[in-house]
Image: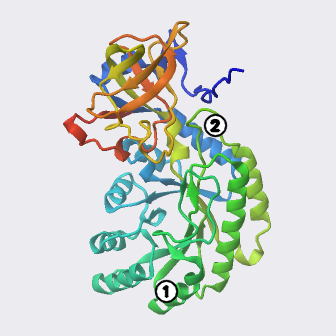
Amino acid sequence: MTTIPPKHAPMTQFPVEDHCLVIGGIPLTRLAQRIGSTPFYAYDRQLITARIQSLRQSLPPEILLHYAMKANPMPAVVQHLAGLVDGIDVASAGEMKIALDAGVAAENISFAGPGKNRQELACAIAAGIIINVESEHELETIAQLGKETGFHPRIAIRVNPDFELKSSGMKMGGGSKQFGIDAERVPAALQRIAQLKLDLEGLHIFSGSQNLRVEAIQEAHEKTLQLGLQLAALSPVPMRTINIGGGFGIPYFPGENPLDLQTVGTNLQQLLAGIPSSFSNIRFVIELGRYMVAEAGIYVCRILEKKISRGHTFLITNGGLHHHLAASGNFGQVIRKNYPVTIGNKMNALETEVVSVVGPLCTPLDLLANQMELPRAEPGDLVVVFQSGAYGLTASPTAFLGHPAPQEVLV
């Protein structure tokens, strides 16, 4: 009995005209001519806007939405999102500068990540943004810098919970972690914050990312809210905000389906309705990166050569893992699986063939698609990697082997 391999979830977010993918209202071939060279990343601003609207419609209205900039820090993308979300979460002083330059108010920017150095902390304190404290040592450093600079630091405690987001692509909580203060040590840290008279915003509890299982997200929301409120009740300083993290996933690989956002939102509404009135002054934040931007982006490279080696057809392109490490399977995948890939100027073509798409790098790891059925292509055609709006360019080793970096456009 022949087993039919699972297919990718349909990539229907971009329209097709005359067999050509359309990005931001521009046919791909024309966009490539406008940009002037390949490879490039293109992000559709209307798709980003639509995703934020979908979140607003599906999640409880009292939930604040924050964008985790590490997913895609392109300044134009951040500028666009700055007008759509309630806050920006950064992971370096460089990202903080981009957020401030985009016009985001300092009080709506938070700074997370282990190992912040003194200079970064001093910049964050001077800017007036919220620092998510990752350790007791960092807390003391912040207090000392506050005295040295004369500025009053604004902080939140990042909590390492005693649970994780089950089935998540990347676990950020539970067990021993470099992220945050272990939950059982947070009460003592809260007492210390009161002694130091620091400005406490609240808590940041992030347990995992890239999850498509509604049940897992529901369980994480329930546990996160329970833990957050327990800690808030123990705090000698009133809390204003509890960031319950994100973790919403998108379908990348065969057999995966989109997250049922409506069900997630309904469950969260029920959880919020059960919170005692004594916590009515606390605001709740959901922090998302990938879910806001990934499906709005594509990576595009051009076929240089079509090569047949012992019956196996290779499409050799001018792009590869140095631009898109995740699509090559070398960014967290244990068993390599193909991203959704197509030939962007031959959509809906009737003639197909099984090929592997490789880049120009001198390594067998430079693989964008392994034995995929794609529209029959020739040199000059455009290979498109979908789901590329997050963890693409800035998560890739662009200096590897000295090839030029791709351009990025928001259209």
For this orientation, the residue located farthest to the bottom is: 195
Residue 394 % position (x, y): 35, 46
Q: Dividing the image into 4 quarters, which one contains the C terminus?
A: top left
Q: Callout 2: few (<14), some (14-19), or many (20+) C-alpha neighbours within 10 Å?
A: some
Give the secondary structure at mark 1.
helix
Q: Dividing the image into 4 quarters, which one contains the N terminus?
A: top right
Looking at the rendered structure, the kind of residue marked 2 is Glu
Q: How is the image coloured?
A: rainbow
Callout 1–callout 2 Cβ contact below 8 Å: no
Residue 256's disc is: 2
Q: Quadrant of residue 243?
A: bottom right
Between marks 1 and 2, how big is the CA–CA gap? 44 Å
Please report whichever mark, 1 or 2, sits nearer to the chain's N-terminal start.
1
Looking at the rendered structure, the kind of residue marked 1 is Ile
Residue 341 % position (x, y): 48, 26
Residue 198 seen: yes
Q: Quadrant of residue 307?
A: top left
For this orientation, the residue located farthest to the left is: 402
Q: Which residue is mark 1?
A: 193
Image height check: is 5 above or below 94? above
Give the secondary structure at mark 2.
loop
Residue 284 % position (x, y): 63, 64
Q: Residue at x 43, y 22 (%)?
A: 356
Residue 295 % position (x, y): 53, 36
Taking depth in this image into account, of 20 and 104 the one nearest to the observer is 20
For this orientation, the residue located farthest to the top is: 351
Foreground disc of the pair 1, 2: 2
Image height check: is 407 above or below 66? above
Taking depth in this image into account, of 168 and 281 the one nearest to the observer is 168
Q: Callout 1: few (<14), some (14-19), or many (20+) C-alpha neighbours within 10 Å?
A: many
Taking depth in this image into account, of 290 and 325 the one nearest to the observer is 325
Q: Residue at x 46, y 59 (%)?
A: 89
